[in-house]
Amino acid sequence: MDAEVLDIIFHHGRNVEKGKDRRWTNYPDNKHHLGEVDVDRLDVFYLRNYFKELGYEKMKKVWWHVPQRSLEVGLRRLNSDNELREMCFYGEKNNGIIDVYIEHEISEPEILQGQDVIVHLDDQCPKLFP
């Protein structure tokens, strides 16, 4: 992969936490590949606001992972241009791949007021599998 572009992999869906084996993990690990991003056009605000593209309303923090380190010691907060430059440097050394973790809030469901909907189910249900 060209050193001028990065493949940014967003991990989202749950917060990073210690698993049963006492190692830090992100489970379930939902991933989204941003693809080849030109490092000269990359900015902190774009990455920090990408949670909206993934369908989340609120974001707590955005972290990037230093390659070849465990999540416990390798997560760095992405909140400045200096961190972005360091992330790009490590990404270029890692074959152009960098992992970004989004810590998001869980949205409150919106309750709609209106008429009740009643669904009638038949007593018999067709078999889906033979």
Image (tube, rainbow, N blue to C red):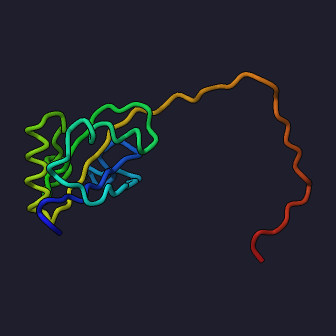
Of all residues shown, which one is farthest toward the front? 41
Is residue 35 found left or right of 65 in the rendered image?
right
Up-down: is 30 above or below 77?
below
Q: Quadrant of the C terminus?
A: bottom right
User: In this figure, what is the number of numbered marks?
Assistant: 0
* Left or right position of 13 against 47: right
Res 124 quadrant in image: bottom right
The structure residue drawn at horizontal position 40% and vertical position 32%, both measured from the top left corner, is 105
**Position in image of residue 81 (x %, y %):** 12, 37
Q: Quadrant of the N terminus?
A: bottom left
- From this viewpoint, which residue is outermost toward the bottom? 130
Give the residue displayed 33% in from the left and 52% down from the top.
Answer: 20
Q: Is residue 32 above or below residue 46?
A: below
**Residue at 14% from the left image edge and 43% from the top image edge:** 84
Residue 93 percent location from the top left of the image: 8, 62
Residue found at the far right of this picture: 123
Q: Nearer the viewer, residue 87 or 126?
A: 87
**x, y percent for residue 39:** 16, 52
Q: Residue at x 13, y 59 (%)?
A: 4
State the image coordinates of residue 25 (x, y, percent, origin top left): 30, 51
Nearest to the observer: residue 77 or residue 3 = 3
Left or right: 70, with 111 as reference point: left
In this rendering, is residue 95 above or below 110? below
